[in-house]
Image: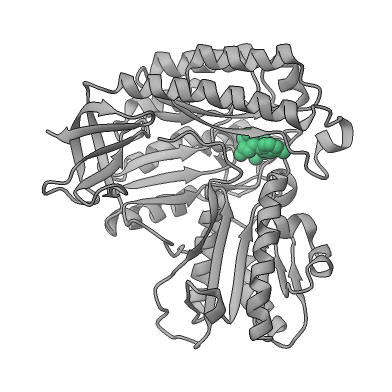
Amino acid sequence: MENKVIDESNQGEALLIEDPSHPNGKKLFLESYGCAMNFSDSEIVASILKDKGFSTTQNFFEADVIFVNTCAIREGAEQRVRKRLTEYRKAKKLKPDLIIGVLGCMAERLKSQFLEQEKLVDIVVGPDAYRSLPELIEIAETGQKAVNVLLSKEETYADIAPVRLGSNGVTAFISITRGCDNMCSFCVVPFTRGRERSRDPQTIVNEATDLFNEGYREVTLLGQNVDSYLWTGGGLKKENVSDEELKNATTFSQLLEKVALIHYDLRVRFSTSHPKDMLDDVLHTIAKYENICNYVHLPVQSGNSRILEMMNRGYTREWYLNRIDAIRRIIPDAGISMDIISGFCSETEEEHKDTLSLMETVKYDFGYMFAYSERPKTLAERKLKDDVPVEVKSRRLAEIVELQLKHSAYRTKQGVGKVHKVLVEGTSKKSKEELFGRNSQSTVVVFPKENYKKGDYVNVLVTNCTGGTLIGTAL
Ligand code: 5AD
Ligand code: SF4
């Protein structure tokens, strides 16, 4: 697994869907930026538009409608989308009735202001308003601008069967919550995605079961904070849940168990865990079921308790390390990854060193590392000064990345000489004669193809490695 110093995990890629059963003759170009949650949302958008008869194209010059699902988490992500919009302008010049829509977090953040700033945009739709897309397209077809950025306290798209985009047919994402109530001071997500809602567990189990029956072998349950998943019969978490309601509720740990029980050949992953809410019950459930992967993505953001407090993360360095100890105790061979932000407001050199020393203690398998980027409306933007100079943020980030590369190499090497159960995801990028997949800890494993194929579980004896990939042969 590579280390990621990224602005997004997904740099925007054209997504294709199968042709609809009742085509309307119109073509959609759909592109998704940002996190897995956004990608999962694009699958909902694709499903809604396929039902309306849209087919897709990979060439935006051929499109009648261009939709870009955007990310607002860091300034760089927004800049990338704006640059992309200037490229769409060329297509609009050639085809004036082309409709261009901006979806997702940037749409929510900028609302109708977007239509003024970016004259070529016709539709602006926030993450909770995708059901209204067909109507908004109709409005835009009459030459008017169309906006729907209403956030909802209920919408979970629970009844919409997502169309699997760019799928390998083996692994898929399932959203289990939407929105976030945590208010980390650096983060724009609570503003762009609204209040946290949990999705009816039965619809989650049904979706996972359907995927398994279609041949999928791994699902990743997605939420901004999966540990706070709680279904008490309605989506929005109430301020005070009574004991009676809690007795009948479904917690994240119970949800994991329900999904694991669908079939022992269906692997279950989840993201993202929150250190303040990840308690031992979840870890015991992971340990209990072989098909729940031994891998926890546990963003730390900083190794210093003062900075964590300013970030409003709800835990200290000690609490976080206690959670790491719990993972190691309950799931001894777990893979652990993190997110870290360098140069948050007022971070001193000593405090940065605390982050490095925490990394030294944990020795993460891999990580996603970022320089702090101030976001409008957030607590940090309103109350704190973005006072660490850009060069200092970058230098600290480089130190964090360098250390992580060392730890990734160390962890990968630990996998050599052992047998790993690998779920095959496809042919290796480097050679047609090799397959690749992941082990339980989410590390990529490459091995000669022989007669194995996508979707198979293969026991691979690992004999070699690169910085982040294990290399071996099937047993
Ligand atoms: N600046 C830099 N990184 C950020 N993240 C979230 N907001 C910001 C920001 N304003 C990072 C956090 C989070 C990940 C998804 O993105 O590390 O866990
Ligand atoms: Fe943002 Fe914090 Fe919510 Fe994650 S938990 S989405 S970092 S506010």
- Coordinates of residue 250 in the picture (x, y in percent): 50, 39
- Coordinates of residue 276 in the picture (x, y in percent): 62, 24
Q: Please tell me which residue is depicted at 54% across the width and 37% down the height of the picture.
A: 226
Task: Place residue 116 in its image quadrant.
Answer: bottom right
Q: Is residue 102 among what the camera can see?
A: no
In terms of image quarters, where does ligand 1 lie?
Answer: top right
Q: Please tell me which residue is depicted at 68% across the width and 17% down the height of the picture.
A: 352
Q: Could you tell me which quadrant the C terminus lies in?
A: top left
Task: Place residue 85 in its image quadrant.
Answer: bottom right
Q: Is residue 380 above or below residue 235?
A: above
Q: Is residue 350 above or below residue 391?
A: above
- Answer with left or right where residue 111 lies relative to residue 235: right
Q: Please tell me which residue is depicted at 65% across the width and 22% down the height of the picture.
A: 302
Tell which of 389 and 183 is nearer to you: 389
Q: Could you tell me which quadrant the N terminus lies in?
A: top left
- Coordinates of residue 424 in the picture (x, y in percent): 26, 45
